[in-house]
Amino acid sequence: MITTLFWRCPICKKEDSIFVKRSIFKSNRLFCSNCHSYWTIRRIVGKDYVLKLTDTFGNSREMSLSQWYKMIKKDFVPTKKDINLREIEKGEDIYLISNRIKLFAQKENPILYNHNEKEFPWKACKDTHYSYIKYVGWGNLLLSNERLFWNSNNTLTFFWLKKINSVFNEANVFFSIWYGDYKYKFRFYKDSILKWLNYIGWFSEEIFRKYKHKIRIANY
Ligand SMILES: [Zn+2]
């Protein structure tokens, strides 16, 4: 899905403003609801996609998808959401909230059985690397500058960013993390995994400065 790549408008920098406009007579377009720029898409055989931008002034410019993606990421700074959770600490703010998504965890993970702590399990008694994944439940994921929160049935459980080993995209549908010895997979539907990787990438530098912990983040 090209809109999950265009998670931020390369022209006006507004997030989640780009939509596909389908047309019977013309080719489909990408359209920014904020600045009204639009892109027409052309595929060069054996090469990247080329997208032609037409901005509000009628000026046009053609660039490859990878060049546009560089512009999408350029000068990115997260903006905090106006949300107050009882659970957040001083100096902590919420920056992202996902739509409803599914959580999966490995079959040995106590989260599937009885886990009453606020923090997600991270220490396993045996090697879980190759164990299979089971469905945990539906919920929303929230990102603060310190944690990922999982909100399910109005119960919050969290992961410390300072304990996340790695974050990555699997098959463009799963946003996955390794938290200590356990792997967690979030099935995204509408949300852009690239957007979440960009945000976590941005906060990972702060986490490294504060805690000397490095989060490995897949290319984004
Ligand atoms: Zn725009």
Image (cartoon, grey):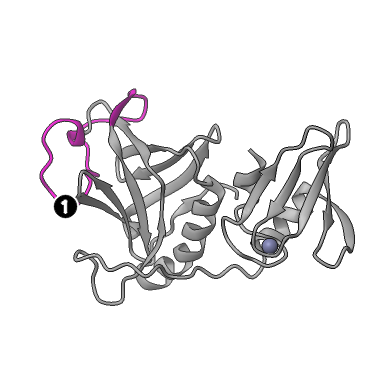
Residue at 76% of width from left, 44% of height from top?
29
Q: Is 24 placed left or right of 196 in the picture? A: right
Q: Is 2 placed left or right of 205 in the picture? A: right
Name the quadrant containing residue 172.
Answer: top right
Q: Alpha-carbon neighbours of circle 1 within 10 Å: few (<14), some, or many (≥20)?
A: few
Q: Is residue 115 magenta?
A: yes
Residue placed most toward the observer, 41 or 185:
41
Q: Is 87 placed left or right of 59 in the picture? A: left
Overall secondary structure of the magenta stretch?
loop
Q: Which residues are magenta?
A: 110-136
Identify residue for label 1.
118
Up/down of 180 relative to 135, above or below: below
Name the quadrant containing residue 114.
Answer: top left
Residue at 25% of width from left, 25% of height from top?
107
Circle 1: element type: loop
Q: Within the displayed image, which quadrant is ligand 1 positioned in? A: bottom right
Place of residue 117 in the rendered image (x, y in percent of width and height, measured from the top left): 13, 48
| Amino acid at pointer 1 | Lys
Residue at 81% of width from left, 40% of height from top?
48
Can I make out residue 125 in this image?
no
Place of residue 96 in the rendered image (x, y in percent of width and height, measured from the top left): 42, 59
